[in-house]
Structures are given as structure tokens and as C-alpha cells.
Amino acid sequence: MSLKRRNRVEATFAMSSMTDLIFLLLLFFVMASTMSSPNDIKINLPQSRAKQNTKNVVAKVSIDNLGNYFVALGKAKPVAIAAEDLEGYLASVQQQDSAMYIALHADEDIAYKEVVHVLDIANEHKMKLVIATKR
């Protein structure tokens, strides 16, 4: 085998290991990016000029642009819930901790009556409610 051809073969082997390394890094970053935020609900929050953040949110109620309701406790993953079951769910959560806050994440395009429905439940059970907005 000539020296020129041998160098070309060695260069090919060196490049193949570099390609494997780049492929593995690409695969790692694709897998890591999908694990970081697992299928969150896409909600377009309305704007606000308020600067205060609420830290003690225990229950989160989300309403997407189709009017579907989702609930979550703390940092848990949101779970779909029927509108008629929302009051019972929030009442059971309030029994666990009466000093809790409810964070309402409502899409800016939904009907106002959906927001009023959650406000009525919170008012009836004397719950503290915070409406989430984006800055």
C-alpha cells in the first residue's frame, strides 16, 4: 500500500470517530431538551404592569384557548379536569391547607365567563386567588 493511500485511509478513520462523537452529542442535546419541559400547556397570558410575584401558590388552575380546564398542585404536571368537577377539586385542596393560594392561568382569548366561573368558586369558598399575567 502506498504511503499516500495509507494516509488517506487513516484520515477517513479519524473522521469517522469524530462524526460518531458529534452524532452522540447531538442525540444527547435533543434528548435533554425534550426532558426539560414535558408537554406544558400552551397558554397565551394577558399583559400586566404589576411587578409583584406570588411565591405561595399551592394550586394552579389553567384554562387554554379552547376552554379546557387543567389543575396542578405545586410543581406537579397539570391534569385535565371537567369544568363541573373544578369546584369539588378546589374544595378538597382547600381542606388540606386553608391558607393556600390559587393561581389562575387563563388564555387571553377565552370567554370572560370562564374566568368568572373560577372567580365565583374562589369567592364562594373564601379562597385567595391570583390571576397570572405575563410582563
Image: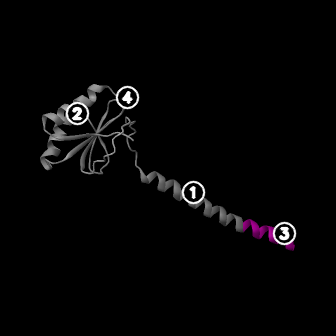
Query: Most prominent secondary structure in the magenta stretch?
Result: helix
Q: Quadrant of residue 12?
A: bottom right
Q: Position of residue 53 (x, y in %)?
A: 31, 47
- Is residue 98 toward the left or the right of residue 81 in the image? left
Q: Nearer the viewer, mark 3 or mark 2?
A: 2
The residue beneath circle 3 is 5
Numbered tag placed on residue 109 in the rendering: 4
Identify the image's colour scheme: rainbow, by chain, secondary structure or one colour.
one colour
- Is residue 31 toward the left or the right of residue 48 in the image? right
**Residue type beneath disc 2:** Val
The residue beneath circle 2 is 118
Local packing at callout 1 (Cα closer than 10 Å; few below 14, some 14-19, many 20+) is few
- Tag 4's secondary structure? loop
Mark 4 and mark 3: Cα distance apart in space: 67 Å
Q: Is residue 40 above or below residue 65?
A: below
**Residue type beneath disc 4:** Asp
- Tag 3's secondary structure? helix
Q: Nearer the viewer, mark 3 or mark 1?
A: 1
> In front: 23, or 120?
120
- Which sits earlier in the primary sequence, circle 2 or circle 1? 1
Q: Note whether residue 112 is visible.
A: yes
Q: Quadrant of residue 15?
A: bottom right
**Residue type beneath disc 1:** Leu
**Residue type beneath disc 3:** Arg
Mark 4 and mark 1: Cα distance apart in space: 37 Å
Numbered tag placed on residue 97 in the rendering: none
Q: Which residues are magenta?
A: 2-13
Q: Which image quarter is the N terminus in?
A: bottom right
Mark 3 and mark 2: Cα distance apart in space: 75 Å
